Image: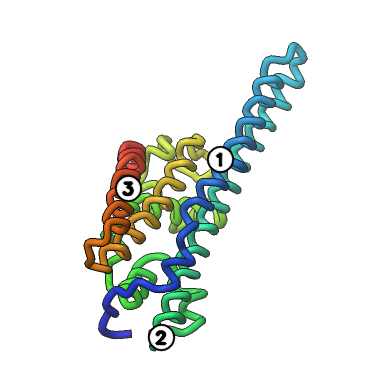
Amino acid sequence: MTTPHTWKHGWADAYAYRNGAIAEEFLDLVVKPSLSALRQKHLELASSDDLVISGFMAHDHRDLINKTNMAFCLSIQSLWEQQLRRYLGDCVGSLGIEGVTADELEHVPWGERINKLFQYVRGTDLTTFDSYATLNKLQLLGNACRHGDGKSSRKLFKLHPELCPEQYPSVQSVQWRVELLAEFVDAIVLFWVDLEILGLESFANEDTRVVTRIANLRNSRESRLARITVSS
């Protein structure tokens, strides 16, 4: 891989059209209802007159809630990573881009190497997207949830100490909130919105439908940008 390719809008962008909506549907239809039901169950256990239930069982249920949050974080990370890799693969295939192997598309790790791959395939810097910092937090937290405390968790808590305000932070003690998972989904949606804006702007024409679509997308992105900025 050498010189980055100039942006070309193609089938890959059309295939990615619903990526943001899919992430939102997962949050609204799966994550939020499940966590709400678990929280309600915990309240019932904690308020029981039976000390065994209000003590031991409620404590165990709190642990279940934390493990569920970790599982959902991993699911959101996996969803995002698969979307990004599929998108790059579709770009390579539909635009006839040479010098990128299937192995790279499948296994290149998050960070500098995937940034270089994205730069080469799309001709733009992945790190300049407003969603990048939050997506990077998602990757680090997802890796920490998968592997436990280690390199990713140390980097995560250095960048985002608010996630675990303890003297010796651990992924097992992360302060989980549904708003944190929603923040990650907002970042995913924002990324795909900004990608669509870049694609439409590449047409460089004054078609009313294109101009209107860009304006609508710019309006819709502001609320998401505000939410991830406030949360971070």
Please state, as top left, top right, bottom left or bottom right, where the C terminus lies in the image: top left
Residue at image position (71%, 21%) is: 45
Q: Position of residue 125 (x, y in %)?
A: 27, 67
SS for dot 3: helix
SS for dot 1: helix
**Mark 2 Cα within 10 Å, few/some/many (few <14, many 20+)?**
few
Q: Amino acid at mark 3?
A: Asn
Q: Position of residue 137 (x, y in %)?
A: 40, 51
Q: Amino acid at mark 1?
A: Asp
Q: Which residue is mark 3?
A: 216
Mark sitting earlier along the chain (2/3): 2
Which picture quadrant has residue 1?
Answer: bottom left
Q: Is residue 163 left or right of residue 32?
A: left
Residue at image position (28%, 49%) is: 215
Extreme residue toward the front, this view: 208
**Vertical arrangement, residue 119 with respect to residue 145, above or below:** below
**Vertical arrangement, residue 18 with respect to residue 223, above or below:** below
Give the label on residue 28, or none: 1
Q: Position of residue 49 (x, y in %)?
A: 74, 11
Residue at image position (55%, 46%) is: 25
Q: Which residue is mark 2?
A: 96
Mark sitting earlier along the chain (2/1): 1
Q: Nearer the viewer, residue 111 or 167?
A: 111
Q: Nearer the viewer, residue 10 or 137?
A: 10
Residue at image position (42%, 46%) is: 186
C-alpha span from label 1 to label 3: 22 Å
Q: Nearer the viewer, mark 2 or mark 3?
A: 3
Which picture quadrant has residue 38?
Answer: top right
